[in-house]
Image: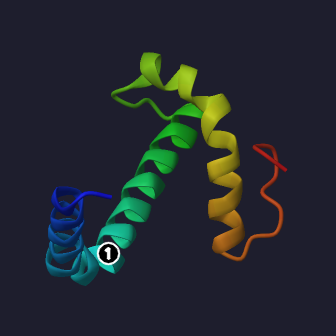
Amino acid sequence: MSERESVWRRIERFHDELFVVPWRASLARETRREEEVLLALLFLEGLGVPGPADYYALELYPDLIQAFHDWHRRQGIDRFPGVCC
């Protein structure tokens, strides 16, 4: 590793400690909240409640079934009838 790479790695570590570490928990919380809102919208649409992204949401269902399963398990619901379990 050259001296130049070492300097850039130290700068990167400093940047992470200064900007990323203090906000990591809140960023993860916000990401989870956004995912839960998206899941709620998608599955409400699946139940027949009209939504603004009906056409685009259909192609997302296969990818989001596992995410929905993880969400309802985190909420303490062992089985969610009719959707993923």
From the viewer's perspective, is 26 left or right of 8?
right
The N terminus, quarter of image: bottom left
Which colouring convention does the figure follow?
rainbow
* Above or below, 34 relative to 49: below
* Count of numbered circles on the image: 1
Residue at the image point whose x is 35% and y is 79% from the top: 25
Residue at the image point whose x is 51% and y is 47% from the top: 39
Residue 22 appears at what percent x and percent y? 23, 83
Asked whether 24 or 65 is in front, the reply is 24
Place residue 2 in its image quadrant.
bottom left
From the viewer's perspective, is 16 left or right of 49?
left
Residue at the image point whose x is 62% and y is 34% from the top: 63
Residue 51 appears at what percent x and percent y? 39, 31
Residue of label 1: 24
Residue 27 appears at what percent x and percent y? 30, 69
Asked whether 64 or 16 is in front, the reply is 16
From the viewer's perspective, is 41 left or right of 73?
left
